[in-house]
Image (cartoon, grey):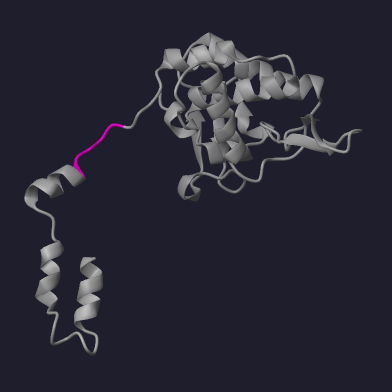
Amino acid sequence: MKRFFIWLAGQPGYKSRISYSDAEYFNLSVKETRIAKAHRDARVPTLEQIRHVVRTMPATTEIERRDRAIIAFTILTGARDGATASLKLKHMDIDQGRVGQDARQVKTKFSKSFQTWFFPVGDDIRQVVVDWVGYLRHEKLWGVDDPLFPATKIVVGDSRHFEVSGLDRKHWSSAGPIRTIFKDAFAAAGLPYFNPHSSGRP
């Protein structure tokens, strides 16, 4: 509003009615300024809440295994959802306990490349991710350039309706599906929704 009145004061027909100093009435008081600038801690889930979600998630189908691995991976690495959606198998180094976020291939913040080391959040969380990587490499025989968390494959079924048909050998086009996975998993576990980025802060 202040910027608008400053602009308006310079327009023909308003110069005689509005002065530039009138815009100062939109300044906040000292108290209001302190309130506006006050630091607010982000609402984040506890490690036990995330562990509860992972433990209660089903893992029968490969889609369910992928979804559970995504949540375990997020708390294990702290990776952002956009980066998680664009990671490839070659970016994972299980033996060294790290993820190479190469900005040339991974959607990182500010397009910066860096290494992410696994957080000490428990062997159970780590094992979910290890098992998932092993499944893709040894059972599905996927290569290093295949997605770490592939998109869901949708086909037209016999009933002429769209149906889920396992994993697609490609990345998601956005991080939207990952946020949906988080939302559904936390709701199923009886917990309030936390977005993927807040859940990646142990």
Q: Main secondary structure of the magenta part?
A: loop
Q: Is residue 179 above or below residue 136?
A: below
The magenta-colored residue range is 37-41
Task: Look at the image and tell me whether residue 120 can be seen.
Answer: no
Horizontal side of residue 4 vs 192, given as left or right: left
In screen coordinates, is 48 left or right of 28?
right
Q: Residue at 61% across / 36% down in the picture?
A: 177
Relative to residue 37, is residue 117 depicted above or below? above
Q: Does the image show residue 105?
A: yes
Q: Quadrant of the C terminus?
A: top left
Q: Is residue 45 left or right of residue 189?
A: left
Residue 57 x, y percent position in the rendering: 61, 15
Q: How far from the left and from the top, in percent, is residue 82?
A: 55, 41
Position of the N terminus by quadrant: bottom left
Quarter holding residue 194: top left
Which residue is pictured at 50% across the width and 36% down the height? 80
Q: Nearer the viewer, residue 150 or 195?
A: 195
**Which residue sits at x=74%, y=24%?**
136
Reply yes or no: does residue 165 show up in magenta: no
Number of marks in the image?
Answer: 0
Foreground of the two, 159 or 173: 159
Measured from the top left, where is residue 42 in percent x and y? 33, 32
Residue reaching furthest bottom? 12
Q: Quadrant of residue 178?
A: top right
